[in-house]
Amino acid sequence: MMITMLSGKIHRVKVTAADVDYEGSITIDEKLMEMAGIHVNQQVQVVNVTNGNRFETYAIPGKKASGVIQTNGACAHLAKPGDIVIVLTYASIPAAMATQWQPQVVQVDEKNRPIHSIDKEAEKFLDARRRRAS
């Protein structure tokens, strides 16, 4: 039996822009996408913590390490600049793997810079950034 599990999560990012006239999607900082295991054009669920809206769209990469989170098209009506959102992806896996399953979760600071990740490769990136900052 296959079950659906969380595969990637960018936790509590701030929407930085919204463009209702752009073809629908959500633009996400490419580094955040990589760290959460989100692929270009992959379906994502967006949960708006600020207003309770939930919607599905697809992810497109924004400038790497820019912190950009931009809702586009109809999504721009559901999440506006300043709103706090959670971006989620899911994967179907065999039920027998569920107890070992580990999603790639990225937490960010107030400027949408990654501060913590469960993914080992992403954590290496964060460690290097911390060393440069000190």
Image: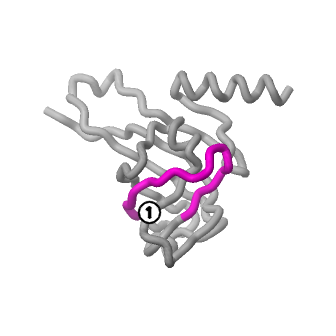
The image shows residue 4, relative to residue 121, as above or below, that is: below
59 is within the stretch colored magenta: yes
> Which residue is located at x 37 percent, y 61 percent?
56
> Which residue is located at x 22 percent, y 37 percent?
3
Q: Main secondary structure of the magenta part?
A: strand
> Which residue is located at x 55 percent, y 73 percent?
19
Dot 1 amino acid type = Ser
Along the viewing direction, whichever of 93 and 69 lies nearer the viewer: 69
The image shows residue 114, relative to residue 75, as above or below, that is: above
What colour scheme does the image use? Answer: one colour
Along the viewing direction, whichever of 59 and 91 lies nearer the viewer: 59
Q: Which residues are magenta?
A: 55-70
Q: How busy is the neighbourhood of tag 1: few (under 14 within 10 Å), some, or many (20 plus)?
A: many
Q: Is residue 114 left or right of residue 54?
A: right
The image shows residue 6, relative to residue 98, as above or below, that is: below
Name the residue tied to disc 1. Answer: 25
